[in-house]
Image (spheres, rainbow, N blue to C red):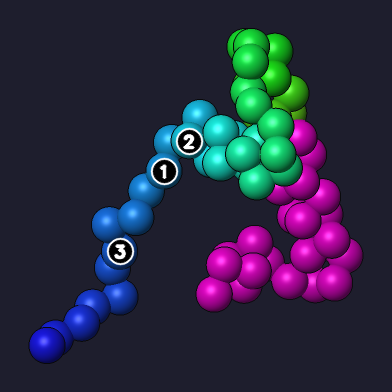
Amino acid sequence: MATSNSTAFNMEFTEIAEEAFERAGREMRSGYDLKTARRSMNLLTLSGKIAASTCGLSTKALLT
């Protein structure tokens, strides 16, 4: 069977946040929970980019 480097796996942010809440043993109950989840994800992404740039890595290097 032939394979390629493409994937069809693509989750919406809401699904990612719901999964994270479930894994933490909690339930997303309000829009505020989703808002804070998005803010936390943005902060984690930002901190990863800052760490990569201080180490001389590009964001693309982190994804490969």
Is 43 on the left or on the right of 41, as rendered?
right
> Is 13 contained in the magenta span?
no
The answer for how far apart the CA atoms under marks 2 and 3 are is: 18 Å
Q: Quadrant of residue 49?
A: bottom right
Q: Position of residue 46 (x, y in %)?
A: 76, 45
Choose between 49 and 11: the one closer to the eye: 11
Is residue 52 at all visible to an observer of this figure? Answer: yes
Is 38 on the left or on the right of 3, as rendered?
right
The answer for how far apart the CA atoms under marks 3 and 1 are is: 12 Å
In the rendered structure, are the residues bearing label 2 and label 1 in contact, judged by CB atoms less than 8 Å apart?
yes
Rendered-image quadrant of the C terminus: bottom right
Region in magenta: 40-64
Q: Earlier in the sequence, mark 2 or mark 3?
A: 3
| Rendered image: mark on residue 7 | 3
Q: Quadrant of residue 52?
A: bottom right
Secondary element type, mark 2 = helix
Inspect the image, locate mark 2, and give the three-letter code of the amino acid beneath it. Glu
